[in-house]
Amino acid sequence: MYSNPSNVDILIMCALKDEFDQLLQVNNGIHEEWREFNLDNGRNAAYATFKTSSDSMISICATWVASMGRESTQAVVGTIISQLKPKCLAMSGICAGRRNKTELGDVIFADRLWSYDAGKKIVENGKEVFQGDMLPYKPSELIVQNMQRMKSVFKNQDSSWMNLKPQLSLEEQENWVLKHLLNKKNPVEQTDFDENCPNWSEVIQRLWNKGWVDKPTKLTVLGEEHIQNLIILNPKELPKASEFSVHVAPIATGATVTEDDGIFNSFSSFMRKVLGLDMEGSGLAASAEAYNLPFILAKGVSDFADTYKDDRYRIFAARASAELLILLLRNSDFLFSSNNIKKESISHSNPKSTEIIEYLADLYPNFEETQVLWEQAGGRLSDLEAKSRPLNRWHTIWKKVNQGAQVTPQALLQAIYKEYPHNSVIKSLLDLY
């Protein structure tokens, strides 16, 4: 008779039941098979153990929130942490991806997360203007480095789950149909019809809805313009989806399901490399920061945040994100050791300079973000040197602020605390300085 777990290494949250179901299909490296049980609060969950790359064992508990949204995620996480005492929070599932930068089914590991709709609305010159209040959450530099390794590590693993991926997107099938209509040919009568348009009913309905084809199968002016432009840009053959890829990039979190072709362009002005959009990520990251835990978020691209979604990729995207997340966890033993930086990484009473420098380098590994922080603290950009390694850069910065630079330790820490108001480490340093 199994007893319910009271301590686990990782708590994995999913937003919805179908994402959770795909997580429970992951068995690469599994030691103790998934078994379902009820948490103390009655919530259904599952438990399993996996073998790591160093032949040790990690324990994983997983559950789902049952509704989308960051607030729901935070509420559920808070009720579970006291029972399971996890050493790391994680999430797998689906997200919207940035068109032309990602493909349907790709996996994005979040190296930054923020709530893009947090802020206030004001009226300027008679027009309503939204002023964002961007508070980014970031996993440690060590976690991000391991995320980047997954781009190649997964290729050496059993990847039979890749068979879940649809062979052709609906857009590829649409373009094939449009090209034949442009050439005055009936697509249905072509010998390779079944091979190139297996989802005919969905494809022709989408073409009608887009206004590219009139019923039954007459190419419209808009449809002709679209396919001709596509042929000009791709004279040898119509574009095909790239192979499955793993990305490490920012993911934006919002409170509503989005159908907006231009939303990623609107993000780019302040988060240039953003590739993903979801509804839960910043909620998980906020919980991790509140409980001083490391976090990892992996999401599979199921659509492009536009009107014409291809829902056939949903299952694969959820499964791919779960596979890559657990693979990362199995290759990240450092998360579960006593040396984990995110868990009370410095002495609050008498921290050493090296401890502070390591912590700040972990919090701000990116030079561009360090520049923004330095300006917010009252410094000049010319004061900073673009040293390649964050540790070297922050060693120089911390030395400057303690030797009479324009920016004082107090001003620098105040600027950081404004971005991370729940960070107990920064709060304790402010008390000291």
Image (spheres, grey):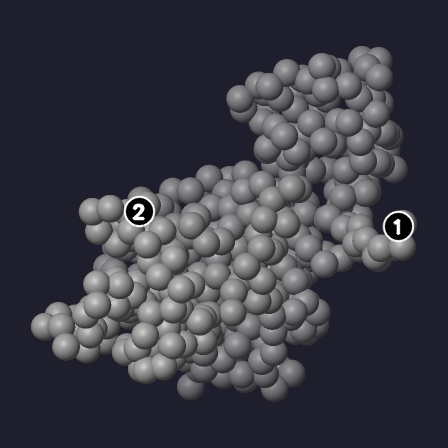
Q: Residues within 10 Å of mark 1 (few under 14, many from 20)?
A: few
Task: Give left or right: position of 315 versus 381.
Answer: left
Residue 155 place in picture, x, y as percent: 26, 50
Up-down: is 247 above or below 173? above
Helix, strand or loop for disc 1: strand
Up-down: is 361 above or below 287? above
The quadrant of the rendering that contains the N terminus is bottom left
**Residue 81's image quarter?**
bottom right
Q: Nearer the viewer, mark 1 or mark 2?
A: 2
Residue 59 place in picture, x, y as percent: 45, 64
Up-down: is 392 above or below 277? above
Which label number is shown at residue 232? 2
| Residue 222 appearing in the image | yes
User: Viewer-proximal residue, 37 or 19?
Assistant: 19
Residue pictured at 17% horizontal, 73% vertical: 193
The amino acid marked with disc number 2 is: Ile
User: Viewer-proximal residue, 184 or 417?
Assistant: 184
Helix, strand or loop for disc 2: helix
The amino acid marked with disc number 1 is: Glu
Residue bearing the label numbered 1:
124
Residue 263 place in picture, x, y as percent: 60, 56
The quadrant of the rendering that contains the C terminus is top right
User: Viewer-proximal residue, 348 or 222?
Assistant: 222
Residue pictured at 70% horizontal, 69% vertical: 71
Question: In 3D space, how far apart are the residues under numbered discs 1 and 2 (Cα atoms)?
Answer: 44 Å
